[in-house]
Amino acid sequence: MTMTSAEGNDNTAAARFTPIADVDLDTYARLIAAVLIRGIRAEEMDCFTTAAGISPSRWALARAGWMARIREHEDVRDAYALSYRRAVLDVKDRTRVAS
């Protein structure tokens, strides 16, 4: 399977962590955590990502690219898991404070 560099088929560790469509891995993990915890539906995603400063087209590229990198590279998968866990705790803390 041939992939473009935007999808994450670069063999250097630094390149694997390069932001995709200007969305870095921590931002991706934070947004995914917020979507799942807050129950944001598919039809709400455009508004949600736009409010986060990411256009729907950039989000689509970033999401596809990060999913490919996470699937193909163990170091990216491990870093995502850590970022996601931190993001979940952060989102839950913010939700608790806002209540």
Image (cartoon, rainbow, N blue to C red):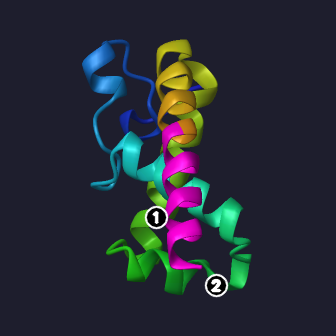
Q: Amino acid at mark 2?
A: Glu
Dot 2: few (<14), some (14–19), or many (≥20) neighbours within 10 Å?
few
Q: Is residue 85 above or below residue 44?
A: above
Residue appearing at x 59%, y 40% in the figure = 67
Q: Is residue 50 magenta?
A: no
Question: Could you classify mark 1 by the number of other residues whose Cα lies within 10 Å: few (under 14), some (14-19), or many (20 or more)?
Answer: many
Q: Is residue 13 left or right of residue 62?
A: left
Tell me the quarter of the picture where residue 81 sits: top right
Residue 23, percent from left and from top:
34, 53
Q: Nearer the viewer, residue 35 or 2?
A: 35
Task: Give the quadrant of residue 4.
Answer: top left
Left or right of 30? Residue 85 is right
Is most of the magenta stretch helix, strand or loop? Answer: helix
Percent across and percent down for residue 60 are: 52, 63
Query: Which residue is under mark 1?
Result: 59
Write down the region rendered in magenta.
86-99
Q: Which mark is residue 44?
A: 2
What secondary structure is marked by label 1?
Answer: helix
Q: Which mark is residue 90?
A: none
**What element does badge 2 sit on?**
helix
Residue 94 part of the magenta-drawn span: yes
Q: Quadrant of residue 18?
A: top left
- Quadrant into which the C terminus falls: bottom right
Residue 47: x %, y % from top left: 51, 86
User: Three-letter amino acid code at disc 1?
Assistant: Trp
